[in-house]
Amino acid sequence: MRARYTLLPILAAVIALPLQSHAAETVFFPQLYAGIALGKSTLAPQSNTALSDDSDSGFKLLLGYDLGERSSVELHFADLGAARFADNSTLSYSTFGVEYVYQAYANYGLSGLERREGFMAFTKIGLGLLDTDGEGIDIERDHDWHLSLGAGVGIDLMERTRLRLEFNAYDTDAHLLTLGIVRRIGVAPSWPFGNKVPAPVPTPVLQAPAPAAPKAVQPPPSDVDADGVDDRRDLCPATPPKRRVDESGCVFGGILEGVQFELASAALTLPARARLDAVIQDMQRYPKLRVQITAHTDNQGSGQYNLQLSIKRARSVAEYLIEHGISPDRLRAVGAGESQPIYRNDNRSGRQGNRRVEFKVLNY
């Protein structure tokens, strides 16, 4: 008897294709996840003996890590059960391998992709090692390695836990349909960003304002932090004194003055790091605040180069904040390249003004 396995030499090219085509401006902070699934297998080994039962129950264990908004890599072990022959002999199957997962559809769009929320559909391709064990039968194997293909859908079951229906084909003679649970592990990943779990930030206590001099102008009763924004629409009601705020009363909106980079690089300058240290203190004061970081360039160089440089610069700012205790879940990094100038690019001062970093409050 022969159990047949095929390894396609174009596997690397097939996997590389979606990796190369997925060039998004948004930087996604990855997470580790694990899952378990149960299901039904269909087995079709080549044999001179007739099959009496070509299906069995099976299970799968997986461990995955996000690569981007749409992509992940997964390790899996699957026990596919056994095929049974008319002479009462059996041939059992199990496989271990790695797969590239591509999220082809998300009904919540980019936000759903970033947080792995809502209804999502995915495809898979990978490489595995298929093992067979015969009882009462002789086995001859062509190949141990095999190509695996798969597709499935997932939907939220509870926070960070998803229900996943999936079909996998392990070469041509072993298929598995499973229903499983996938759980994302942790809120802030430790690799590759090296972020630290922030220490609890004590809730600030607002002190009653000290008595002012007789001629001093008192802030209006509806503006406790004296930032010029009425408390009824102030999202950050305890802004430190003399800090410029946006229309929502937060210091995070608009251009982040002083955040600059080394020439043609994403490396932060020393003044930029000092400026971001102040931002870190502000974000620790408001632990539920979520912001978008957008980096811009001037028009010197090609548009594609400037776009990639802006992505790296936005990510550099985000990584600095993460290294100092800000959770990745609170940050979204975006590169705009040269597409949104606010000054003319035909003079030095205009180009310098266009090389900027902006913060936008997404929610509070």
Image: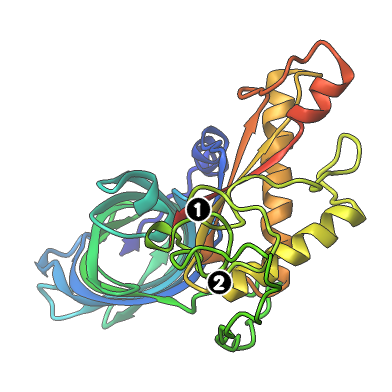
Q: Quadrant of residue 210?
A: bottom right
Q: Disc 2 marks which amino acid?
A: Ala
Residue, disc 2: 238
**Colouring:** rainbow
Q: In this view, does 336 lie above or below 68?
A: above
What quarter of the picture does the C terminus occupy?
A: bottom left
Q: In this view, does 331 lie to the left or right of 44?
A: right
In this view, the mark in front (2 or 1): 2
Q: How crowded is mark 1: few (under 14 residues within 10 Å), some or many (20 or more)?
A: some
Q: Can residue 336 be seen in this view?
A: yes
Quadrant occupied by the N terminus: bottom left
**Viewer-side residue, 217 vs 348:** 217
Lower sequence index among marks 2 and 1: 2
Closer-to-camera residue (109/182): 109
Q: Residue 167 in the image: x percent, y percent?
A: 24, 57
Residue 307 coordinates in the image, percent (x, y)? 67, 30
- Residue occupying image coordinates x 20% and y 79%: 89
Do the CB atoms of the residues marked 2 and 1 lie less than 8 Å apart? no
**Circle 2 crowding by C-alpha within 10 Å: few under 14, some 14–19, many from 20:** many
> Spatial distance from mark 2 to mark 1, Cα to Cα?
16 Å
Q: Which residue is label 1 attached to?
A: 361
Q: In this view, does 352 lie to the left or right of 332?
A: right
Q: Where is residue 312 in the image (x, y as percent from the top left)?
A: 72, 44
* Mark 1: amino acid: Val
Using the rendered view, name the quadrant where residue 306 is placed. Answer: top right
Local SS, label 2: loop
Q: Is mark 1 on a helix, strand or loop?
A: strand
Q: In this view, does 26 lie to the left or right of 349?
A: left
Q: What residue is shown at x 80% (from left), y 21% (from top)?
A: 350
Counting labels gives 2
* Residue name at image x 52 percent, y 74 percent: 287
